[in-house]
């Protein structure tokens, strides 16, 4: 523990810039590592992926629902400021919206690369199927994306217009981004805020719906007892909030003076995350209890895979220990008042929830629908065991790295959050 | 699509291509306005349909040769490529082995009522034909050392060079009066006649075939008991089917077997399978009787004991058609179920119950194949089983073991010239005549032994191996390799670079069956013959095996006794034929015209499905058939026409007369082709015979334990078997077949596994006193606790990229072993111990 | 309507021994991983008659289906290969597979064989979930198809199929195709589209499944056994275990068998109503 404390301590003072450097290095390193994955995917399609026709969704789909969750969570936190007027959070409002936008982009990229035919994504609009949860989900997050972009732009517009007169590169960029808007009057700013408020208000149910929609996408699959639960949409929503909030505590700490000026915001955010996490645990525990008490073989089989299958460690070490128990402790103990610790807990939770996502996607598929399928034919694609391939990990790394870099660029080039009264 | 049309003569193409294509586009259209996934048109590719559809190209009737089953097939060839292989509905071999079943609902246009079928391997022939690992051109060895780890360092050569050099070596041999020093091995059916002719004209008595690795022990057992080499079980009309070590629904010897067996069960027959392994056939059975390997004879004798004790035998049949019953009854008097139970591990009550069920259910059939047969006591054990059938009158009656009337093409024997005759009269190298029930296929094991020890009447110099994987087919892989390496020159003709090919001095590319001819007299109970014909040209421009043989014969200038250059003059047309294929077509026509069909090759091609089927059909109780008077007039009677037991031949024995009957009850009837003309429970003649080891032959089906028994060090029996997914050692590189069976786990009983700490999926070392191998464990109660076993054919170190290292090979755990009565290779007699790897 | 239980029906089938009956029930429980009562018995006579009437008023002309006789199936897997040969499916794609599941509890692990194509469910969950309407159930004959040009390869349908009847094409190839032998020029006749395998081109990257060899229908949507236009798996079946035909046609083999014999469908409790039945 002292080691960690020391590490955390070392960030104090010049801490923010050190953290930023680390952040950039991580981002670029991940992108470099990930370039192989991109090459492999583009050159060879799915042939080197390790999913098959039993476990047909893998790491990329898990990454997708993970990022989607982050996005919705971050957005909902931002709405605390814009919709519910919790001014405390306004300090990180833009950051939250930027986070939501970047993670949404990552989500879309993850699922995009997972498609057998990426070039046909537009088919979802051209040939709709109104009974498909996936179609609904796509339409909803398309709408959500538009909303996010508009909201982001409105949040920045005033600063963009102001900054566009500078003769620097930044000035030119701002001019471009301001899309011809010239109005810097207080009136226009107020109008922007009004629209943001409306958008954010619309956005809340939208985010809830599409995140719940992702939950429904899984929950409605009757063929997979592990997923087929009414709790799924709620579970998705809650864990989205938890992960989004957790990520924001971290982002705020690194980019929004979380160790100095916005210390309190981070700590309050930590409280919020704690509350959500407790709720999340409650629902998850009831999901397990109900399943085991109910004893429906397929349902239990999936959960058994989770807790005692070949990847038990994803659950026990990653999801439970790293993602839940340790951060809970940190947040419950006096450390919960220390922004550094809170940020660290945020990191753990955000990382741990990826384990949760994996544990939703894969065990749900890894139970043979008809016993003996894996032995019925000798093919690596007909196999209930799945571990992501190098290419899958690599491409995921690229996406994460890209997220860090995009976020950093946004943070670097876009107007910084002004001190709000 | 191939639909037989008698007016057009061969086949009719249904012209629906254009219309169907247009319709396909429209057919899928429908504008339903539901909220769900909407139906919409899926556009068809009309050009593709016209070029590649079922109506495009040709459907050529032929016969499969993925195994020796010779099922009828229809091959769809488009743009010179085999697109698909389907069953040939006109071929009885794809449907039933009795004619009433075959003809019921048969139409000339469609064939059999329910259509034919082909097994997975038949469907996967395409992958065999287009396997990129095939041998593509003749190759010559440049590394003089031979062995598993010696790269031959092949040098690619032309066919001309290959034939030139091989012929030169053979010529030298012949010129030196050593033609008999050529050993020749072939498969037992494909283009065998021309190979035999070559050997005769060249002057080597050493032409051998794979049957001695296969079922010569069964042949011997039945020959001893009832005088026919291969009676066939009439399952579909039977009510009780008892199988000893015979796996017909999975080791599909003929593809009609799954149908007639399951149909029999559907019609109320009871199926009982005696086998150490719960084979896929046993899985269809009502009862599986796990037995200790090599003890089937004891069980059969005990069953006979019960039947006789209970007086359930068919007394009338025994009285009229058998000899030696009393001595047999006396012999089995103490072969009680309790006695057999000790030996076989089968409970006493089970033996008694099955005996009674078998004897009281009519009709009942008992049959056996490789299971008991590939053990050192297999011949007498099989004979005991064959005699069970005799006890119940179970021969040649509906629902029993039928004597097939297998007239098809006729091998027109060639007369060797003087030079050839001299060496031909030499003793065979394997000393086949030492084997009282040996088969013309020879005794491979004896050859390997003699080569290794440098013994035998002379030392062979050249080996010619066509369509055999001698090394992998064992028994005793390593020893076989060593023996083959002793030859001065080994020529191998194979489609793949097999383990045997790896030892060759010359490796020549063979043809896959889709590239060549053959005539197939089918193993059904009445005469039927299917044509195999080339559906594509040999892919690499290679010679078909028969063309290679003929080319070699031409180069050597081999002549018949009357001075005709045999391989140059059409045997039927009597005219010189330059083209090798045309010459062979004439050769085949000759066999057809002289055989039962009495038609030419071209006429055969025009029959529905290119199958000739005798309209006469299956006949029963043929043993009671009187010999027609006109035949008697020209017949040769060995003894007194008035005396019972005098054998009747069509010609004097000195003129290769064939047995056609016997005098029984004062009448000349067909009877059984045993010395007495009847089924022999006891054979006085055998009493004076010696086996190949010089031991006296038991005149009764005496049970003796097999030679190799488990001991403290090697406590487990190791057996092996065939499954529907592969043929012997030749299909493990087949891409499709590997999908349905990628490897051959070693099946271990849970009790055994537990004792040795082995779990399902573990790798285990399997060790015998001759060698060891690593295998993956499959723990299941499908096997006798004292036995472990696996599918045969895997564990290649050559053959092709896909095959190498796949599954486990058990060949090195055995040694050269053959049975002294028939020369049968003993593949299933091994004892091992296991150790977790 | 009161559905008869499996037990009721088995009781009425005189051709089954009590032993077999018990085994079959145990087996079904194992296969579907659910209570045996879930695998319902189809009372064919009545149900099909009703459906024939109902179909008269709609575009529905036929209801193609299979009746697979587990007692005839010998587990040879010829059906698996015949389907490959017909449809030129790549490694990893098997429109039908054969289970050789052990009936437990038994002392001898005796297997029972079952081939399993797509069931062309009456209510196919796979179709409902497709975001782009690429897979659908044909009105006229109930065959569930995939439009390769529309499918985006999201694989949602695979997760939704309760019977593992869908397969993703990963762009793998068998050696003769991979290494460009003459066979590589042979196209797949599926949907009468005659596509040749090419990197990244459909059906690579698509989900694929059994389509009852739809391309063998004539312009009227009919199959013809005599002309060889019949599902490849059924045509080759060594045990003659696969019966195919129009379930609405009282003269068909499949209709007759459902009238005369006991049939079950897998996971009946899901309400998918498979059109593939198993005779026990
Ligand atoms: N798919 C396929 N079919 C084939 C072939 C092939 O290679 N593949 N080969 C063909 C050929 S050439 C032949 S000869 C036939 C052979 O056909 P089978 O005679 O059926 O051959 P196997 O499968 O070798 O052996 C049959 C059974 O004998 C059992 N067995 C072993 N030892 C004993 C014993 O001591 N007693 C008893 N009772 N049973 C024992 C084995 O467990 C096995 O189930 O198959 C033919 N059909
Ligand atoms: N352990 C064990 N051993 C056994 C058996 C067993 O059950 N267990 N079974 C035995 C039995 S029953 C038999 S019949 C024998 C069979 O033994 P073999 O007759 O040797 O049969 P395969 O092992 O299939 O080897 C055939 C060889 O011919 C090649 N070949 C295939 N098709 C063609 C062709 O069209 N032309 C040419 N030129 N070559 C071709 C193949 O590539 C292969 O190398 O094996 C016996 N060996
Ligand atoms: S049994 Fe199978 S492999 Fe053998 S000839 Fe018949 S179809 Fe071909
Ligand atoms: S079996 Fe599966 S793929 Fe086939 S129709 Fe039913 S749900 Fe769809
Ligand atoms: S994989 Fe294709 S058919 Fe399946 S749901 Fe996705 S788009 Fe539809
Ligand atoms: S019906 Fe056709 S597509 Fe379906 S499994 Fe059979 S052969 Fe394959
Ligand atoms: S082909 Fe027929 S008998 Fe063979 S596995 Fe398939 S369904 Fe069963
Ligand atoms: Mo054999």
Image (spheres, rainbow, N blue to C red):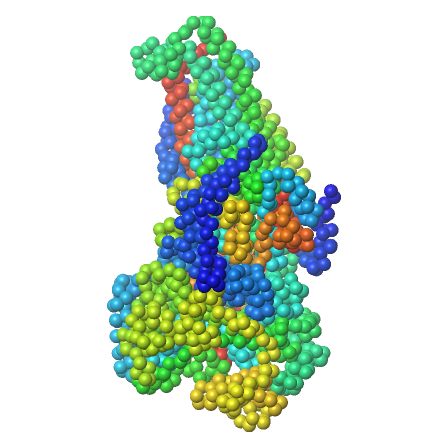
- Classify C134 as above or below A85: below
Q: Residue furthest front?
A: B7
Q: Is residue B338 left or right of residue B704?
A: right
Residue A64 in picture, x, y percent from top left: 48, 32
Nearer to the camera, A89 or A157:
A157
Q: Nearer the viewer, residue A389 or B541?
A: B541
Residue A188: quarter of image: top left
Write down the quadrant of residue A115 in the picture.
top left
Give above or below for B44 relative to B287: above
Q: Whole-percent x and y of residue C48?
A: 67, 46
Is residue C178 among the parts visible in the rendering?
A: yes
Q: Residue at x 55, y 20 (%)?
A: A204
Q: In which image quadrant can residue B341 be found?
A: bottom right
Marks counted in the figure total 0
Left-right relation of B450 to B121: left
B158 relative to B538 in the view: left or right: left
Residue name at image x 73 percent, y 42 percent: C1
- When the figure is inspected, residue C225 is found, relative to residue A137, above or below; the finding is below
Task: Name the residue nearer the viewer: B419 or B478.
Answer: B419
Say above or below: A133 vs A410: below
Give coordinates of residue A382: x percent, y percent.
50, 47
Picture residue at 52% right of the left edge, 35% below the top: C133
The x, y position of residue A358, in whole percent, is: 52, 36
Residue sitting at 64 percent across and 52 percent down? C251
């Amino acid at each position: 523990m002292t080691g960690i404390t020391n590490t955390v301590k070392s960030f104090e003072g010049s801490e923010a810039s050190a953290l930023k450097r680390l952040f950039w290095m991580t981002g670029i390193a991940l992108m470099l590592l990930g370039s192989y994955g991109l090459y492999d995917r583009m050159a060879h399609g799915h042939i080197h992926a390790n999913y098959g026709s039993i476990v047909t969704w893998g790491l990329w789909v898990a990454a997708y629902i993970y990022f989607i969750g982050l996005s919705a969570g971050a957005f909902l936190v931002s709405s605390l400021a814009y919709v519910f007027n919790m001014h405390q959070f306004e300090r990180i409002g833009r950051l939250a919206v930027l986070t939501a936008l970047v993670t949404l982009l990552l989500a879309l990229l993850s699922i995009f690369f997972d498609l057998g035919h990426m070039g046909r994504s537009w088919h979802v609009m051209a040939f709709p199927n109104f009974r498909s949860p996936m179609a609904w989900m796509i339409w909803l997050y398309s709408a959500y994306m538009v909303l996010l972009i508009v909201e982001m732009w409105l949040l920045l517009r005033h600063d963009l217009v102001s900054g566009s007169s500078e003769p620097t590169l930044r000035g030119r960029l701002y001019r471009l981004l301001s899309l011809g808007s010239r109005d810097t009057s207080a009136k226009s700013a107020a109008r922007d805020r009004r629209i943001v408020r409306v958008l954010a208000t619309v956005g809340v149910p939208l985010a809830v719906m599409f995140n719940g929609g992702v939950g429904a996408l899984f929950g409605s699959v009757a063929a997979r007892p592990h997923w087929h639960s009414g709790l799924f949409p709620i579970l998705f929503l809650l864990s989205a909030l938890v992960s989004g909030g957790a990520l924001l505590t971290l982002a705020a700490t690194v980019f929004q003076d979380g160790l100095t000026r916005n210390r309190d915001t981070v700590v309050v955010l930590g409280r919020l995350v704690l509350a959500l996490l407790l709720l999340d645990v409650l629902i998850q525990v009831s999901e397990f209890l109900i399943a085991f008490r109910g004893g429906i073989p397929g349902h239990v089989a999936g959960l058994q895979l989770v807790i005692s299958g070949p990847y038990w460690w994803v659950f026990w070490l990653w999801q439970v220990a790293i993602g839940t128990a340790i951060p809970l402790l940190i947040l419950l103990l006096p450390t919960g008042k220390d922004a550094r610790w809170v940020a660290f807990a945020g990191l753990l939770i955000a990382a741990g929830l990826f384990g949760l996502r994996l544990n939703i996607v894969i065990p749900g598929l890894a139970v043979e629908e008809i016993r003996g399928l894996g032995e019925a034919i000798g093919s690596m694609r007909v196999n209930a065991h799945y571990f992501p391939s190098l290419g899958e990990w690599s491409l995921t790394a690229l996406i994460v790295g890209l997220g860090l870099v995009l976020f950093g660029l946004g943070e670097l080039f876009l107007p910084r959050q002004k001190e709000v009264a | 699509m191939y639909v037989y049309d008698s007016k057009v003569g061969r086949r009719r193409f249904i012209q629906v291509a254009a219309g169907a294509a247009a319709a396909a586009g429209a057919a899928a259209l429908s504008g339903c306005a539901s909220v769900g996934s909407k139906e919409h048109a899926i556009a068809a590719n009309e050009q593709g349909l016209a070029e590649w559809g079922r109506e495009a190209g040709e459907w050529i009737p032929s016969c499969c040769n993925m195994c020796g089953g010779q099922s009828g097939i229809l091959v769809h060839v488009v743009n010179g490529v085999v697109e698909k292989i389907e069953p040939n509905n006109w071929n009885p071999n794809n449907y039933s082995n009795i004619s009433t079943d075959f003809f019921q609902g048969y139409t000339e246009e469609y064939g059999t009522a329910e259509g034919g079928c082909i097994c997975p391997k038949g469907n996967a022939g395409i992958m065999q034909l287009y396997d990129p690992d095939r041998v593509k051109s003749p190759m010559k060895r440049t590394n003089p050392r031979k062995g598993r780890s010696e790269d031959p360092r092949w040098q690619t050569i032309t066919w001309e060079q290959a034939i030139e050099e091989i012929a030169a070596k053979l010529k030298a041999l012949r010129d030196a009066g050593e033609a008999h020093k050529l050993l020749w091995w072939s498969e037992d059916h494909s283009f065998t006649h021309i190979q035999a002719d070559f050997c005769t004209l060249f002057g080597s008595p050493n032409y051998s075939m794979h049957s001695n690795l296969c079922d010569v022990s069964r042949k011997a057992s039945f020959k001893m008991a009832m005088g026919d080499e291969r009676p066939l079980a009439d399952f579909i009309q039977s009510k009780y089917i008892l199988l000893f070590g015979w796996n017909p629904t999975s080791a599909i010897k003929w593809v009609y077997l799954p149908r007639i067996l399951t149909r029999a069960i559907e019609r109320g027959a009871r199926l009982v399978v005696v086998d150490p392994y719960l084979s896929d056939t046993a899985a269809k059975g009502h009862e599986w009787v796990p037995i200790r390997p090599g003890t089937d004879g004891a069980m059969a004798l005990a069953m006979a004991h019960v039947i006789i004790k209970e007086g359930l035998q068919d007394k009338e049949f025994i009285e009229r058609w058998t000899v030696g019953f009393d001595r047999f009854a006396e012999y089995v008097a103490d072969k009680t179920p309790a006695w057999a139970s000790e030996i076989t591990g089968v409970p006493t009550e089970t033996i008694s119950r099955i005996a009674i069920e078998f004897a009281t259910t009519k009709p009942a059939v008992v049959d056996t194949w490789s299971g008991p047969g590939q053990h050192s006591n297999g011949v007498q054990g099989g004979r005991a089983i064959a005699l069970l059938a005799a006890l119940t009158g179970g021969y040649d009656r509906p629902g029993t073991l039928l004597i097939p009337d297998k007239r098809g093409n006729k091998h027109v024997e060639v007369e060797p010239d003087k030079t050839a005759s001299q060496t031909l009269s030499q003793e065979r190298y394997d000393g086949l005549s030492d084997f009282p029930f040996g088969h013309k296929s020879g005794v491979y094991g004896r050859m390997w032994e003699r080569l290794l020890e440098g013994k035998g009447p002379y030392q062979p110099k050249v080996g010619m191996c066509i369509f055999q994987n001698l090394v992998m087919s064992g028994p005793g892989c390593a020893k076989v390799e060593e023996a083959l390496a002793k030859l001065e020159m080994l020529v191998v003709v194979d489609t793949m670079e097999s383990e045997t090919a790896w030892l060759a001095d010359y490796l020549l590319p063979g043809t896959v069956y889709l590239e060549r001819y053959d005539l197939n007299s089918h193993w059904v109970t009445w005469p039927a013959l299917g044509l195999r014909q080339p559906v594509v040209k040999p892919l690499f421009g290679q010679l078909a095996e028969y063309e290679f043989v003929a080319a070699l014969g031409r180069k050597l200038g081999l002549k018949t006794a009357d001075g005709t250059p045999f391989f140059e003059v059409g045997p039927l047309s009597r005219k010189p034929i330059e083209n090798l294929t045309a010459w062979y077509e004439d050769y085949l026509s000759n066999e057809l015209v002289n055989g039962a069909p009495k038609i030419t090759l071209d006429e055969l091609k025009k029959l529905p499905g290119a199958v000739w089927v005798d309209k006469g059909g299956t006949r029963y109780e043929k043993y009671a058939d009187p010999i027609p008077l006109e035949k008697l007039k020209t017949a040769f009677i060995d003894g007194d026409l008035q005396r019972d037991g005098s054998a009747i031949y069509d010609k004097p024995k000195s003129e290769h007369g064939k047995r056609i009957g016997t005098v029984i009850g004062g009448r000349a009837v067909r009877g059984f082709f045993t010395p007495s003309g009847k089924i022999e429970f006891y054979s006085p003649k055998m009493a004076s015979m010696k086996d190949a080891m010089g031991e006296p032959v038991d005149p009764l089906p005496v049970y003796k334990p097999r030679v190799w028994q488990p001991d403290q060090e090697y406590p487990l029996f190791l057996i092996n078997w065939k499954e529907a997914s592969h043929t012997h050692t030749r299909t493990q590189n087949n891409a499709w077949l590997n999908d349905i069976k990628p490897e051959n786990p070693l099946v271990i009983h849970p009790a055994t596994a537990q004792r040795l700490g082995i779990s399902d999926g573990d790798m285990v070392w399997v060790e015998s006193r001759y060698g060891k191998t690593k295998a993956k464990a499959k723990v299941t109660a499908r096997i006798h606790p004292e036995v472990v076993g696996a599918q045969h054919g895997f564990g290649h170190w050559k053959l092709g990229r896909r095959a190498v290292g796949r599954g486990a090979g058990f060949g090195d755990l055995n040694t050269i072993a053959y049975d002294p009565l028939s020369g049968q290779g003993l593949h299933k007699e091994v004892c091992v111990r296991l150790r977790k790897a | 309507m009161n559905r008869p239980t499996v037990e009721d029906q088995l009781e009425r089938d005189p051709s089954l021994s009590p032993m077999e009956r018990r085994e079959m029930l145990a087996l079904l429980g194992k296969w579907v991983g659910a209570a045996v009562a879930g695998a319902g018995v189809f009372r064919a006579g009545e149900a099909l008659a009703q459906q024939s009437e109902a179909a008269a008023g709609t575009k529905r002309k036929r209801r193609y289906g299979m009746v697979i006789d587990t007692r005839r199936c010998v587990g040879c897997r010829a059906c698996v290969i015949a389907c490959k040969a017909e449809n030129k499916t790549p490694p990893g794609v098997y429109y039908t597979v054969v289970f050789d599941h052990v009936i437990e509890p038994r002392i001898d692990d005796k297997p029972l064989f079952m081939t399993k194509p797509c069931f062309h469910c009456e209510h196919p969950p796979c179709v409902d979930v497709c975001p782009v309407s690429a897979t659908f159930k044909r009105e006229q004959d109930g065959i569930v198809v995939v439009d390769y040009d529309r499918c985006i390869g999201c694989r949602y349908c695979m997760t939704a199929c309760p019977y593992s009847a869908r397969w993703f094409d990963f762009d793998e190839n068998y050696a003769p195709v991979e290494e460009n032998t003459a066979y590589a020029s042979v196209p797949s006749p599926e949907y009468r589209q005659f596509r040749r395998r090419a990197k990244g081109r459909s059906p690579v990257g698509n989900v694929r499944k059994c389509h009852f060899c739809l391309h063998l229908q004539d312009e009227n949507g009919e199959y013809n056994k005599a002309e060889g236009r019949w599902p490849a798996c059924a045509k080759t079946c060594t045990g003659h275990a696969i019966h195919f035909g129009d379930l609405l046609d009282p003269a068909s083999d499949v209709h007759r068998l459902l009238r005369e014999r006991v049939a079950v469908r897998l996971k009946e409790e899901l309400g998918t109503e498979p059109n593939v039945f198993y005779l026990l």
